[in-house]
Image (cartoon, rainbow, N blue to C red):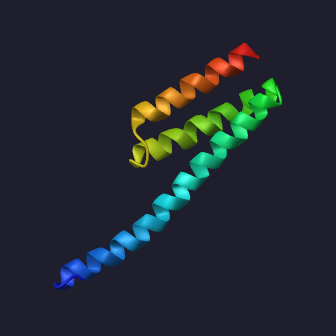
Amino acid sequence: MANTKSAIKRIRRIATQTLVNKARKSKYRNAIKKMNLLLVEKKKDEALKFLPKLNSELMKVAKTGIIKKANASRNISRITKKISAL
């Protein structure tokens, strides 16, 4: 258990930040799932419309450090390639 006042405050801060990070990660995962669903259903037009939103979501998550930037770029690249193949 934390002994100092600053450590106690830090524990509170970490708890709130954990909730924020979980929410962001969930939002990012849901966006990926939605895109994969569009790809499976071969809805190219809808996938192309959703692509900028997905890119934005991935970059926001990468910027905040929840996933690495390379991971976000790789996901965007792979999804774009799949859309092109439709």
Pick the quarter of the image with the N terminus: bottom left
Q: Quadrant of residue 56?
A: top right
Relative to residue 84, is residue 3 depicted above or below?
Answer: below
Judged from this view, the residue extending furthest toward the front is 1
Q: Quadrant of residue 6?
A: bottom left
Residue drawn at x 58%, y 47% is 28
Relative to residue 36, is residue 20 depicted above or below?
Answer: below
Judged from this view, the residue extending furthest toward the left is 4
Residue drawn at x 40%, y 39% is 68
From the viewer's perspective, is 70 left or right of 27? left
From the viewer's perspective, is 69 left or right of 80? left
Pick the quarter of the image with the C terminus: top right
Relative to residue 53, is residue 18 depicted above or below?
Answer: below
Residue 2 point in image, percent of width and height: 22, 82
From the viewer's perspective, is 79 left or right of 6? right
Count of numbered circles in the view: 0
Residue 66 point in image, percent of width and height: 43, 49
Relative to residue 31, is residue 3 depicted above or below?
Answer: below
Residue 24 point in image, percent of width and height: 53, 55
From the viewer's perspective, is 16 left or right of 54? left
